[in-house]
Image: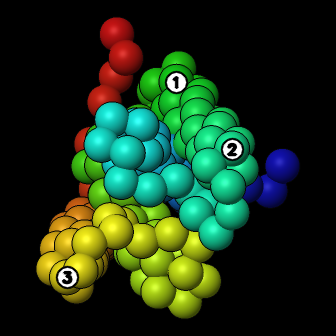
């Protein structure tokens, strides 16, 4: 209807590419945040018992806060995986961009935890020792490296010309 030579299909294809481009990134970010939170809660809260999510009250409140934190991590992880499965079903999974999102989500969560929760809000420390600075430094440096690598992966996939490199689920 006034559109010749398949330009309507090209327009539709471009819109879908942009939608899936964003969805690949957000699926990875959600999964990365959930993965980081799950790892933090499992290793540092439960196995090592270095802290609870909220340490400014009783141990019972700390355990309840850990449970809520654990639920958040699973909601984020499962949400990211549902998006991942949808991208695979649509044959629109862009793994390089998705992994960039995973690293951004993981590093972003870890940096937020290490700066805002540990230092600004002071709801817990990574570990209660005399020289916590070393722990904080390592925690935040690892987070920054994950963010840098994630950003480099995302920026390397921002051109829609590379979008054709999707992974089939078949």
Q: Residue at x 47, y 86 (%)?
A: 119
How many neighbours does mark 2 have within 10 angstroms: few (below 14), some (14-19), or many (20 or more)? Answer: few
In the picture, measured across the screen, residue 65 lies left or right of residue 2, that is left
Q: Earlier in the sequence, mark 1 or mark 3?
A: 1
Q: Which residue corresponds to mark 2? A: 60
How many neighbours does mark 3 have within 10 angstroms: few (below 14), some (14-19), or many (20 or more)? Answer: few
- Is residue 155 depicted above or below 72 in this figure? below
The C terminus: image quadrant: top left
Q: Which residue corresponds to mark 1? A: 85
Q: Say what secondary structure mark 1 lies in.
A: helix
Q: Earlier in the sequence, mark 3 or mark 2?
A: 2
Q: Say what secondary structure mark 3 lies in.
A: loop
Which residue appears farthest toward the right when viewing the image? 1
Disc 1 to disc 3, C-alpha distance: 44 Å
- Hey, which quadrant is residue 127 in on the image? bottom left
Q: Are marks 1 and 3 in contact (CB under 8 Å)?
A: no
Closer to the camera, 58 or 34?
58
């Amino acid at each position: 209807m006034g559109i010749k030579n398949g330009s309507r299909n090209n327009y539709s294809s471009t819109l879908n590419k942009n939608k899936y481009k964003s969805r690949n990134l957000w699926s990875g970010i959600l999964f990365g945040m959930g993965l980081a939170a799950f790892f933090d809660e499992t290793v540092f809260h439960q196995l090592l018992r270095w802290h609870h999510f909220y340490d400014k009250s009783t141990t019972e409140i700390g355990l309840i806060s850990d449970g809520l934190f654990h639920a958040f991590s699973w909601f984020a992880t499962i949400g990211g995986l549902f998006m991942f499965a949808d991208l695979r079903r649509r044959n629109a999974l862009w793994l390089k961009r998705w992994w960039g999102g995973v690293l951004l989500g993981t590093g972003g969560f870890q940096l937020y935890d290490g700066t805002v929760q540990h230092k600004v809000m002071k709801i817990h420390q990574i570990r209660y020792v005399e020289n916590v600075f070393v722990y904080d430094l390592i925690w935040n440096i690892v987070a920054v490296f994950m963010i840098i690598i994630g950003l480099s992966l995302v920026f390397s996939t921002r051109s829609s010309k590379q979008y054709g490199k999707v992974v089939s689920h078949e």
